[in-house]
Image: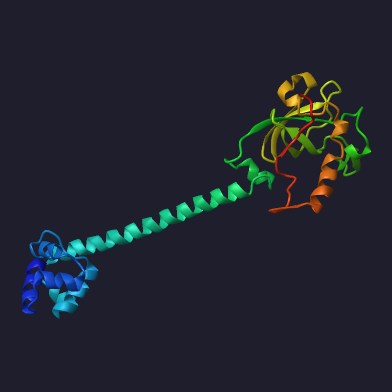
């Protein structure tokens, strides 16, 4: 006997109308009618409830209806597959959302992260540099040569250079390798994404767009010690989010308009 016939038989044995049975199962009477006409069939959780209400075991309920049993078994397998896919999709969404939040809040903190952060645009900025002619002792850094002897060099790297990106004066303190700049090209065109510098090129003052030059000092000596001075000031300044971060962009104003 098929499931729909079994359902009708045992419902009547319990003297229940379709509406009364539907109320006990929290479904509509149309749903019960659909089961009894064989158009649809109840899922496994409703079958268990039906067995309890109609005082019949699940095995007895499904006896003789191999087609419905196969459909229920197939549905159960599909449900498991859907659950696995749902879990996988949720994990992917969590990873994407977590990655977006991390990249949004961790800008300008780490060169490697900034290098691959799609939320930070690649920019071209310009910086004044010390040359062998204009450099002072504090502009040199101590490095080890091939013979592991310590020596002092210029531009290996340039540390905490003020790089101005646009006509509005948006600037950053950046560190990059460059070597000794030519005397006639004491400026750097810097390609960077956040704190990560991908490459530089030495240029002359006239090669810098005039709109950016308006927010730059021509002489590197005007920048000398700026990072150190700002660092001291920032240690004593507490904004609404705590100590300000010198790695993040700031506005550079020289008043040359």
Tell me which colouring the rendered structure shows.
rainbow
| Residue at the image point whose x is 79% and y is 21% from the top | 205
Image height check: is 192 above or below 31? above
Q: Is residue 28 above or below residue 91?
A: below
> Quarter-wise, where is residue 33 in the image?
bottom left
58 relative to 139 in the view: left or right: left
Q: Position of residue 18 (x, y in %)?
A: 10, 69
Picture quarter with the C terminus: top right
Q: Position of residue 223 (x, y in %)?
A: 84, 35
Residue, far bottom: 55
The answer to which of 126 and 169 lies nearer the viewer is 169
Q: Position of residue 19 (x, y in %)?
A: 12, 69
> Does residue 208 appear to the left or right of 103 in the view shown?
right
Q: Is residue 64 above or below residue 148?
A: below
Image quarter where the N terminus lies is: bottom left
> Is residue 85 left or right of 42 when viewed as pictured?
right
State the residue lying farthest toward the top. Answer: 206
Q: Position of residue 3 (x, y in %)?
A: 11, 68
User: Relative to 250, is 121 on the left or the right?
Assistant: left
Can residue 209 be seen in the rendering of this structure? Answer: no
Residue depicted at 83% across the width and 26% down the height: 218
Looking at the picture, tell me which residue is in the foreground, 142 or 20: 20
Q: Does residue 175 sit above or below 124 in this rendering?
A: below
The residue that appears at 37% across and 59% down in the rendered structure is 84
Work out whether residue 154 can be spotted. yes
> In which image quadrant can residue 54 be found?
bottom left
Count of picture labels? 0
What is the residue that sits farthest to the right in this orientation? 137
Asked which quadrant contains residue 13, the reply is bottom left
């Amino acid at each position: 006997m098929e499931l729909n016939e079994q359902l009708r038989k045992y419902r009547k044995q319990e003297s229940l109308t379709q509406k009364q049975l539907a109320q006990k199962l929290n479904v509509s009477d149309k749903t019960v009618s659909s089961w009894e006409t064989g158009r649809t069939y109840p899922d496994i959780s409703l079958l268990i409830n039906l067995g309890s209400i109609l005082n019949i075991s699940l095995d007895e309920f499904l006896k003789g209806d191999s087609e419905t049993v196969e459909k229920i078994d197939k549905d159960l397998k599909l449900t498991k597959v859907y659950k696995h896919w749902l879990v996988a999709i949720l994990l992917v969404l969590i990873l994407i959302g977590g990655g977006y939040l991390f990249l949004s809040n961790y800008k300008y903190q780490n060169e490697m992260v900034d290098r691959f952060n799609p939320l930070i645009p690649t920019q071209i900025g310009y910086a004044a540099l010390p040359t062998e002619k204009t450099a002072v002792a504090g502009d040199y850094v101590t490095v080890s040569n091939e013979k592991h002897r310590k020596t002092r060099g210029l531009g290996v790297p340039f540390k905490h250079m003020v790089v101005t990106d646009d006509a509005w004066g948006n600037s950053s303190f950046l560190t990059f390798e460059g070597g000794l700049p030519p005397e006639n090209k004491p400026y750097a065109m810097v390609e960077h994404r956040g704190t990560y510098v991908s490459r530089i090129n030495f240029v002359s003052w006239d090669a810098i767009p005039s709109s950016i030059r308006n927010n730059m000092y021509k002489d590197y000596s005007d920048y000398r010690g700026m990072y150190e001075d700002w660092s001291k000031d920032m240690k004593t300044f507490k904004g609404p989010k705590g100590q300000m971060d010198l790695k993040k962009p700031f506005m550079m104003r020289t008043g040359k308009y």
